């Protein structure tokens, strides 16, 4: 009770803050003439730079009401086929802009639903990428899989293209909750897909689950988490349900009176965290868990875990290049985002250019803040001397923010041997602390999801 009161005093239960999968966050990207083209940014990569490719497939056969991902429903195969043609053209243009030397080390297909593609489309798209880009022999290929829209042929096509990591969406197995969020998916069907993935040689399986869903109770989420554990995932992402109906209009189908309040959300989160700890998982960052031998757990233990648009990763590539509508690329100098709508995206690519619609060029101050926020959300602490090592005395720009954060979160945030550290039990505050270092928040202009 005392802990709840102390957390309440920090403003946690009312706060709405970004998830910081980038800094600056996407609402602060600009449509700016000074940005330069993706071709220029790609052309400036060092010869020894590693590249990570992200491909966005913005289509789903079903549109789950809870989902805030950028995607659209399709009932016929034509829009997907047309989109793939454009995507292949974009891949060829981007690959042609790269200098000699950089190699692709990671490929991730996300969505939406990449498994909406037929086995033939999967093989064709993977082949196009292989032909267009210089791909390292030991590249890693991961895919987001909707267990209700995949079959053995699709999985085998993905595995033949090199997929060794997969992520499946679960959210919650309770049929009542599934009804309330407009997403039906039985345990049996999910189990069958997990078995197929393992048969196909998937060595790292992630499952997405969500707390804070309508009608979710402590007993219900405990049972659903037990079912998730029987699937033997290597990693789990436990997201807080982001209710953002002003952005994701389909969420208006969700009865907001049935949503747990912020205190109940904290209980759901912490009970589930304890369940994963009891099952031998290591907690990573603010919302991930992994088995101790998993490469993400190893990266976290060695201070190498990173945070990007897909969440947490052990990807250390110098550049992330996003292909497809709404995809975001991160280059050493900043971010570029493709036009979000599929029609505008296709128009730009078919017009012979790149699909960039906005972006952001880092200032030195942004880099300091971005590094600090990323390290803090990965490690729940950050070492000021690492900032000094990178930025010298310029790192002092965040000193006033450190003092303000220490004052705002007394007892929760401590200054220990030159590091800003979250105290035991302070994890729910992590995004709120990160927000203290965000100089764009004061400008407003964007609405966010709950801090917890
Ligand atoms: C692209 S989707 C999943 C892939 C696939 N289409 C599926 O449904 O299985 C990525 C994940 O984002 C998470 N997500 C989507 N909307 C969310 C929301 N409003 N709040 C929290 N997490 C959300 C879900 O856990 C979801 O599995
Ligand atoms: S959860 Fe997956 S299947 Fe459902 S709408 Fe979102 S992206 Fe599509």
Image (tube, rainbow, N blue to C red):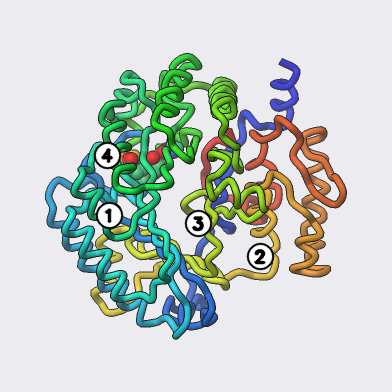
Please name the residue that numbered disc 4 is placed on: 63
Is residue 6 positioned above or below 382 on the image?
above
| Image vertical order of residue 345 relative to residue 159, above or below | below
Q: Are marks 3 and 1 in contact (CB under 8 Å)?
A: no
Give the number of the disc on residue 158. 1
Q: Horizontally, is 130 left or right of 296 in the view?
A: left
Indicate which quadrant contains ligand 1. Answer: top left
Residue 375, given in percent of the width and then of the height, sits at 67, 53
Q: The residue tagged with tag 2: helix, strand or loop?
A: helix
Q: Position of residue 145 (x, y in %)?
A: 32, 45
Displayed quadrant of residue 123: bottom left
Instruction: Tell me which label, 4 or 3, sits earlier in the chain.
Output: 3
* Foreground: disc 2 or disc 3: 2
Of badges 1 and 2, the one in the foreground is 1
Q: Is residue 306 visible?
A: yes
Cβ of mark 4 under 8 A from ligand 2: yes
In front: label 1 or label 4: 1
Residue placed most toward the observer, 385 or 76 = 385
Label 4 element class: loop
Q: Residue at x 27, y 33 (%)?
A: 192
- Residue neighbourhood size for the residue with mark 1, other residues' Cα within 10 Å, grouped as few (<14), some (14–19), many (≥20): many
**Mark 2, residue position:** 367
């Amino acid at each position: 009770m005392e802990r709840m009161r102390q957390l309440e005093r920090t403003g946690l239960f009312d706060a709405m803050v970004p998830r910081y999968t980038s800094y600056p966050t996407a609402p602060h990207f600009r449509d700016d003439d000074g940005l330069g083209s993706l071709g220029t940014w790609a052309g400036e990569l060092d010869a020894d730079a590693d590249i990570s490719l992200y491909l966005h497939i913005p289509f789903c056969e079903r549109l789950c009401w809870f989902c805030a991902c950028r995607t659209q429903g399709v009932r016929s195969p034509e829009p997907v086929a047309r989109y793939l043609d454009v995507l292949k053209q974009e891949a060829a243009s981007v690959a042609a802009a790269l200098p000699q030397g950089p190699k692709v080390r990671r490929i991730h297909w996300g969505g939406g639903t990449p498994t909406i593609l037929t086995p033939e489309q999967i093989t064709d798209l993977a082949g196009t990428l292989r032909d267009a880009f210089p791909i390292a022999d030991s590249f890693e290929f991961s895919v987001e899989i909707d267990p209700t829209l995949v079959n053995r042929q699709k999985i085998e096509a993905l595995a033949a293209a090199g997929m060794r990591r997969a992520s499946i969406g679960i959210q919650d197995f309770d049929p009542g909750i599934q009804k309330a969020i407009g997403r039906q998916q039985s345990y049996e069907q999910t189990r069958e897909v997990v078995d197929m993935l393992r048969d196909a040689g998937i060595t790292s399986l992630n499952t997405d689950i969500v707390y804070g869903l309508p009608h979710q109770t402590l007993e219900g989420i405990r049972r659903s988490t037990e079912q998730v554990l029987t699937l033997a995932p290597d990693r789990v992402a436990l997201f807080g349900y982001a209710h953002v109906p002003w952005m994701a209009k389909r969420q208006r189908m969700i009865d907001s009176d049935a949503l747990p309040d912020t205190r109940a959300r904290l209980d759901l989160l912490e009970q589930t965290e304890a369940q994963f700890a009891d099952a031998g998982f290591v907690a990573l960052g603010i919302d991930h868990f992994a088995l101790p031998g998993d490469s993400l757990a190893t990266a976290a233990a060695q201070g190498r875990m990173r945070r990007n648009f897909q969440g947490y990763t052990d990807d250390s590539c110098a550049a992330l290049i996003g292909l497809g509508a709404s995809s975001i690329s991160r280059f050493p100098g900043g971010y570029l985002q493709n036009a979000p709508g599929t029609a505008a995206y296709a128009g730009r690519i078919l017009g012979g250019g790149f699909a960039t619609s906005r972006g952001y060029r880092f200032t030195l101050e942004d880099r300091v803040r971005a590094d600090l926020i990323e390290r803090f959300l990965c490690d729940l602490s950050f070492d000021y001397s690492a900032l000094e090592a990178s930025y010298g005395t310029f790192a002092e720009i965040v000193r006033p923010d450190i003092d303000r954060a220490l004052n705002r979160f007394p007892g929760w945030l401590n200054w220990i041997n030159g590091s800003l550290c979250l105290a035991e039990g302070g994890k729910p505050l992590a995004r709120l602390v990160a927000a203290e270092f965000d100089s764009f928040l004061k400008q407003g202009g964007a609405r966010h999801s709950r801090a917890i």
